[in-house]
Each structure stands twice: as C-alpha cells, then as structure tokens.
Image (cartoon, grey):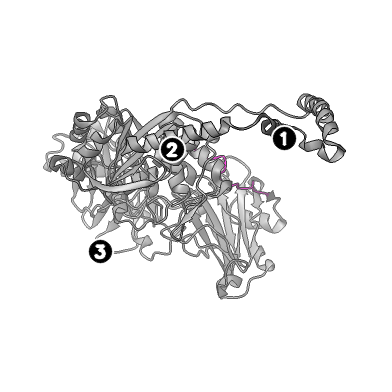
Amino acid sequence: MKKLTSLVALVLALTMVLCACNTTPAESTTDSTTTSTTTTEATTPTPTTTETTTAETTTEETTTEETTTVAPEPTVPELETKSLKVLAIGNSFSEDATAFLWDICDSAGMDEIIIANLYIGGCSLDTHWSNMQANAAAYDYQYNEWGSFNKSKKSIRWALEDEEWDIITIQQVSQNSGMTETFGNLQNILDYIKQYSKNPDAKIYWHMTWAYQQNSTHSGFANYGKDQMTMYNAILDAGKYVLENYEDIDGVIPSGTAVQNLRTSDFGDKVTRDGYHMSWSTGRYMTALTWFHTFTGYPVEYVEWYPTHSRAGISYAVNPDDLDVIRESVTNAVKDPFKVTTSQFAPIVEPVKTTALTDADRKLLKDAGFNPDEYAVLDLEMHVQGYYDSSSASTLTTKDNSTAANVVNFNASRIFNRTDIPFGSVISVDAGYQYRPEAWTDLSAKTASRPANVSDALVVVDKDWWGSFSYRAFNLSAVTTKTMTADDNAHFRVYVPTVANPTIPEGQKKPTTALVTSGDQKAADFEVLAKLGVVSSASDMTKYNVFDWKPTVASYYNSSSNSTRISAANSTATNIPNFISSDIFQKKDLPVGTIIIVDAGYQYRPEGWTKLDSKTSPRPDNVDANVVVVNEGWWGSYAYRAFNVSAIATKTMTAADGAHFRIYVPKA
C-alpha cells in the first residue's frame, strides 16, 4: 500500500513538471518584469519606459541600499538529516512528545519521515516486557508517514519489524520514572529490541520524561514527596543510571529538562494540561522540538513551523510570543541535559531601594540593642488595598483583578528575595497591627503551608525565617479588621543591614543551650555505656568528642512536610514551646559509632531526609531508649538527620532541658 501511494505521488509530480514546461517565455518574462518594477510603477508613464527606466533605477537603488543600510540575510543552515524513522515504545508521555514531531521534521525539509508510537496509557517497563513475552497486540500503533496518525492494534514485535527504524525510544511510566528499582526488566526489553529490530543499526534512546506540576494531584506524585524538584532530580539520576549501566542505550532525550528550563521563565509552571500530561499546545510542541533537536542537532531557532490550529474544541495553537523561550529551553536542555538552565526570560525582579533611618527609627533600633549605624530602611513599595495568598499563587490580589470583599483590609509589599532581606534584617510592626510573611520556593509554585500572621514587635531574620523559601512578601493588616489606607504603612518597617555582620543583641538571639558536659556527666554516661558494653573502661571515653548538636529552644522539624525548622517566626502552632531542635546534620557529622544518649523522662525524634526540601514518608518515630549507637541502618537511605527533643510528659522546654540529650562522636 505504501509503495502504491508513493507511485501515485510520483506520477502527480511528473504531471506538474510537464505543465510547467509548457509555460511560454512571454509569461515568464512578464512575471519577472512585474516583480522587478513594482517599486517604480507609479512614477513611470508607459509600459516601454517602465521596463527600461526601472531596470537602471532598480540597480542603482539596490547598490545604494546594500552598501548603506541592508545587512546580509543570515544563512539558514541546511538540514543534513533527510530521512528519519522513529518508533516510540511508550505511553501517553511519548504520545505527547511525538504529536508534532512529523510536522517539525517536514517543515525543516526532510524527504522521508515516519513517526510511530506504541501506546498503552500508563504503560510501565514491566508491562512492556510482559507484552513482549506474550507477543500481545495490545498497543495502539499510532503511525504517521504523511502528516496524520493512523491507529491499529499491533504488538511490539510487529512494529519493530514493520520499518527499518533509525531510532527506537523507551521510557518508564511517569510515576516510576525516577525509581531505578523499577527498571528490573530494562535489559530484557533491550535484548528483545535488538533481536527483532528490522534495522540492526537502530539507535536506542531513553526518554527522560518530566516532573509533575507542583500542584499535581497524580497519586504517583507521593513517590517524590509531592515535590517537583525532588521528582525532577530523581528523573535525572535515573537517566544517568541508565546511561552508565546499559550499553545498548545510545543517549537520552531530555524532555524533562526542557520542561524544567521553561518553568524558570516567566512562562511559569503551567506547561501541563492536567498536572502531568503536556499541554495540548506549548507542552507538546516543546517536547517534540526536543526530540527533533536531539536526533538531528539542527538549530531550533530555524524551525519556523509551530501549531496554530484547533480541532474538536481543543486549541493546539502556540503563542508566537512564547517561541523564543521555548527554543531557548530546548537548546539548553540538549546542551546540558542533566541540569536546569535558568531562562534569560526569567521574571524580572527590580532592585530594592533603601532610605536613611529617621530619628524614630534610630531610637527604636537603639532601644532594642541594635546599632542604628548598621541599618537602613527597606522601601517595601506597599500597594494599598491588596494581598497575596501564597497557597494559591504569587499574584497580587487587588480590586483590579478580584471582587473579594476583604481586599480593602490589607496593604501588600512587593516580592523580595533572600538577597533583598538578608540574615540580620529586623522586622518591626506596631501594636494593633500584624503582617503575614507570605513565602514561595518558586514564584510559579504554590506554598503548601501558608505562613501565619505575626504581631511580634520585632523579629530578626535568620536562616529559619527563610527556611527553604526563595521569595517572601508581606500582607499588612490591622489586628481589628479595618479598611487600610496609605497612612497605615507607617506602622510596619523592615530594616536591612548595611554591613556584612550586623551586631545582634543577646536579647534578640534565639535561645540556645550552651553545650556543657561536665566531668561528672561524662562519668555518669560512662557507667551507662559500660553496662551496655559500648565501652569497657573509662579511658574509652577519651576516644569520643562531645558533639555540639546546636539546640534551639521552642522549635521543631516535621520531615513529612519539609526540612524547614518550625518556630514562632513562621508558625502559630501551639506545640512549638514543647520542643528543642538541633541543626540538620550529615553522615560526616554523625558517623557510624556515634553514641546518642537521652535521659529517662525525655525522648527525641530523629527526623530524616533523603534530600533537603523533600518530604519523608513515613516520618521517624520518637525514641526514648537510653542509648543508641549509630550504625549503617540508622542512616539507611537518609542523607540528612536532625533531632526534636521533648519531655515524655508534655511540658514547655527550656534551655536547661537540653542537658538531658547528649551525643558523643568518635574521634577521627
């Protein structure tokens, strides 16, 4: 059937050539003359004069323009790949990526193009292998040779033998795409492809798919703590693993990195249609462009085609204003497939402005123990009657874009980054007012736990205040609801340091326990350890150092949520006073052989994370065992650990309670 179709096309082409040969010289000359004389026809009175005068005048004008104003046209590179046959063994993600691949190849000047996708929704590597073993005709064989897809039920073997494929792609189902422990049948699949591929020289590519949208409701998102960057990094690690461990795989298609690159731009995190599948327009076009660029190396800035159509009520049209950032994202992904490249089209954040302290400002800071000479007033650029809701978006809600009745009860600042409000900054709010320090890790993402309102007179910005966030803004309101005006802004101020290490008065520092382990305490610990057989003599204690676990009173972690230390600075949780938390440590800090001691009546929760800013499931339990010796199992898959210390009988913890928890680390 394919040969018959090709023959018909050849006959039609020959017919058109014969017709063109019958065109008379007079017609050709007329067309050419009309084209060359268009610019001067209005000034030439007769046809004869027109031809003669125009020829001379046009030559002079062209010469002048070329030497003074017209730059030479850029040379469009020729596409070296004239034939491309691609078979994807995949699912809906490869269906997304191949939807526009034929059109892109055709527009670039390819002579022979065949794009096919073996589709089963949500199909995993294990399912592919099962279908291979059974030679099951279980797939929608989506085949495109002339610009549109035809579908029929086929098996993988049938498809492998249908064409001499140049490229064959494979991928894991999206929820397992970053979990190499699910790749057990990958080598079997590769062997099968090699056995039945009609073209023994076909290259095999691993399709490195994309992380879900941050607000995705896909059940598989839980595999990555429902965190986009955790999922993306896992996909990268899986891609590296595949290249390092499977010699039959010739390369990766970095669709996931192209998507992540785009998310750093002002386009934001909206490239999916449902939280995980690519959008019908930009998402599908960009992933197809990534495949094209990966296979051909052809510069995508010279690909002029993009979808502009709609069908069955769905718009596939790409906004031409987005083409530059799409091409940039693809180019950078293929160049650096294993890292995110921040877009030059990233949201522009204007530099902050500061003003000198007033006498009132100087008095406020001096009375609180700060050195006023080390600070300036941050210009908050307050918008009267507006607010943010970081659990929804980073868009400022105002009367211009919302009918919410409570808009008038707030004034809102601009959005700031960590550089704008560095450690040591001081936030001041007057009695009767409060502020909500809204926070985002990414301006295109939503914040799962929105920060609470704060009415403390002074707050010093430290690493806990920023936590894992990259951006913050303030909603100012009255404690007793009222309509806000510009005058209310004077009741809220942020002072930023003008020196590298501003002086923080002792009274403003977070309470910490001084690490004092007396000789008597060490002797008592020896008795405990000797009874358990951990040490055999008092001299063994000299082989350990007392470890400073850097305790902070009235704070704790919840690793099932994130790695941010929870305190009164960022939460209104009523149980905060019941805990003392440590800093976060790595294995090099607490090596195997470390001894953890907790006294009777106290307990600790050894929080753990595989990656910071990720979520842990399940969360580690509290431990009240008197002694624990750290071993490989204690670390397990964790890369980071921290401690929440509390009393078994709930109580408000003080610095003195910190002495009931001790850590000894082996001397190097």
| Residue 184 place in picture, x, y as percent | 19, 38
**Residue underneath mark 1:** 35
Q: Are marks 1 and 2 in contact (CB under 8 Å)?
A: no
Question: How far apart are the two marked residues, 3 and 1, measured between alpha carbons?
Answer: 94 Å
Return the disc, 1 or 2, that comes first in the chain's sequence.
Answer: 1
Residue depicted at x 57% and y 49%: 421
First in sequence: mark 3 or mark 2? Answer: 2
The number of numbered discs placed on residues in the rendered structure image is 3
Q: Earlier in the sequence, mark 3 or mark 1?
A: 1
Which three-letter amino acid code belongs to the residue tagged 3?
A: Ala
Q: Position of residue 455 (x, y in %)?
A: 53, 65
Q: Is residue 308 left or right of residue 236?
A: right
Q: Where, by quadrant of the figure, is residue 650 drawn?
A: bottom left
Q: Are marks 3 and 2 in contact (CB under 8 Å)?
A: no
The residue type indicated by label 1 comes to Thr
Q: Secondary structure at mark 3?
A: loop
Q: Could you tell me which secondary element the residue under label 2 belongs to?
A: helix
The picture quadrant where one finds residue 145 is top left
Residue 317 seen by the camera: yes
Marker disc for residue 290: 2
In the rendered view, does 266 fall on the left or right side of 259?
A: right
Tell me the element at label 1.
helix
Q: Tell me the quarter of the image containing the N terminus.
A: top left
Mark 2 crowd level (few <14, some 14–19, many ≥20, 10 Å Cα):
many
**Looking at this view, is 447 or 542 the one in front?**
447
